[in-house]
């Protein structure tokens, strides 16, 4: 492995969100934070070197997003995911959540219904409600082996003529699913029948583990392309969230014009000159680094899996196909949501996301970010194993 992820830079005394907010969120600084979905892994050198090179020019003023930056992204997506976008399809955005808010404004009106499939990343439902749209929940369901799947019959039963938009999380955060083409085709058919636009959050599309393969929703068919707004970027893939640069791809001209109208009202401008350089370099130089990263993440996941297997009656890890976010089924611990949170904070001394924050369907679950260096992961495992052992050793 060319790249090493054994150690990472110390973020303890920086303004990193996951460290700066510990006391506010968990009531103590004495927790190791594994909640915010960025990595405690160094951003790759080829990204930072591009920024340093740009800083050799002494003027940091307004700048258009370089066409070459979008071209680098388009080439990456074509090679990795088999879909071809054009530069004219692309919009700069500082985040997927901002893009989602614009899509809600562009493709629905106040009082219209927007579909979310819970448990899901909290801004999905927060964005809907803040825009005074009606939240239409289509919860995922678990099959006999615990795997999450779409509930198509539930979806069909809830849609009416006020339903305008579906927010798709693909790959899914927090349950870690990579949707199969057949599953996405079922969603597509329902949306086509009811004239529903699909906002497809594909920010985790590069963090997919073999043999799974990400299928861009817009790639399914011409019909899919014509109803899809795709949100993509480098923030998760290369630990670049702090550069605040992602993009939106819309191939259908009519949808693109509707989105553009709202986009211009907000005045997104063109982002940071340093972000442009970082973004382009990541897509040009990132393939080898990403492959090594995924091997490292799988090792971390395996360590976590082994701990959960020791206490399988109390805690189960949902099999992961993508992302670096483990979805832990803690219902066997027979604790209330508050008690479960207290266990992780006070006994394991770990700061996780409570499952309830992803919707009612997340009750009894916790989300753990395992995108950390080997050094940090070993400490996570040590703390979790010790806390579970002290609580349940009499049962083992």
Image: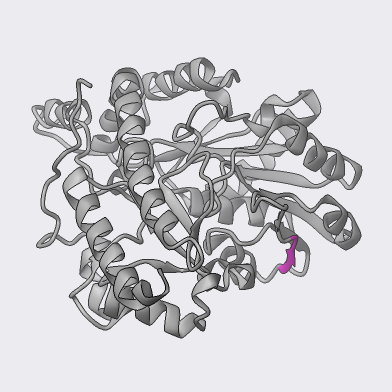
Residue 22 magenta:
no
Q: Is residue 12 above or below residue 178?
A: below
Residue 245: % across, % down:
37, 41
Q: Which quadrant, please, contains the N terminus?
A: top left
Residue 254: % across, % down:
74, 35
Q: Residue at x 17, y 32 (%)?
A: 48
Q: Is residue 107 visible?
A: no
Q: Is residue 377 left or right of residue 313?
A: left
Taking depth in this image into account, of 391 and 250 the one nearest to the observer is 391
Q: Main secondary structure of the magenta part?
A: strand
Q: Is residue 358 visible?
A: yes
Q: Is residue 236 above or below residue 253?
A: below
Q: Residue 17: which quarter of the image?
A: bottom left
Q: Residue 228: which quarter of the image?
A: top right
Q: Residue at x 21, y 51 (%)?
A: 378
Residue 317: % across, % down:
49, 55
Q: Residue at x 11, y 53 (%)?
A: 10
Q: Is residue 206 left or right of residue 288?
A: right
Region rendered in magenta:
134-138
């Amino acid at each position: 492995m060319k790249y090493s992820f054994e150690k990472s830079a110390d973020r303890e005394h920086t303004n990193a969100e996951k460290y700066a907010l510990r006391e506010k969120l968990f009531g103590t600084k004495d927790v190791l934070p594994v909640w915010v979905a960025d990595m405690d892994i160094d951003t790759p050198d080829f990204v930072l070197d591009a920024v340093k090179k740009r800083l050799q020019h002494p003027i940091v003023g307004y700048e258009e997003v370089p066409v070459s930056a979008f071209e680098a992204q388009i080439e990456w997506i074509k090679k990795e995911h088999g879909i071809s976008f054009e530069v004219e399809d692309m919009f700069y955005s500082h985040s997927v959540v901002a893009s989602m808010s614009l899509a809600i404004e562009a493709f629905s009106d106040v009082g219209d219904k927007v579909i979310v499939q819970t448990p899901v990343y909290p801004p999905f439902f927060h964005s809907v409600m803040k825009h005074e749209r009606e939240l239409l929940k289509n919860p995922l369901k678990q099959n006999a082996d615990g795997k999450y799947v779409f509930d198509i019959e539930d979806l069909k039963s809830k849609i009416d003529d006020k339903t305008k938009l579906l927010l798709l999380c693909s790959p899914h955060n927090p349950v870690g699913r990579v949707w199969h083409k057949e599953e996405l085709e079922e969603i597509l058919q329902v949306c086509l029948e009811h004239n529903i636009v699909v906002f497809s959050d594909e920010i985790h599309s590069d963090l997919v583990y073999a043999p799974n393969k990400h299928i861009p929703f817009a790639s399914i068919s011409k019909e899919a392309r014509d109803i899809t707004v795709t949100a993509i970027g480098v923030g998760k893939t290369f630990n670049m969230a702090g550069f605040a640069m992602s993009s939106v791809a819309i191939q259908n001209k009519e949808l693109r014009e509707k989105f553009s109208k709202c986009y211009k009202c907000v005045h997104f401008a063109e982002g940071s000159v340093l972000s442009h350089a970082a973004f382009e370099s990541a897509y040009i130089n990132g393939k080898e680094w990403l492959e090594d990263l995924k091997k490292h993440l799988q090792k971390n996941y395996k360590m976590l899996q082994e701990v959960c297997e020791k206490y399988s009656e109390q805690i189960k890890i949902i099999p992961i196909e993508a992302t670096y976010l483990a979805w832990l089924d803690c219902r066997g611990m027979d604790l209330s949501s508050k008690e479960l949170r207290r266990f992780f904070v006070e006994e394991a001394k770990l700061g996780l996301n409570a499952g309830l924050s992803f919707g009612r369907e997340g009750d009894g679950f916790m989300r753990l970010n395992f995108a950390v260096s080997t050094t940090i992961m070993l400490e996570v495992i040590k703390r979790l194993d010790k806390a579970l052992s002290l609580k349940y050793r009499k049962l083992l």
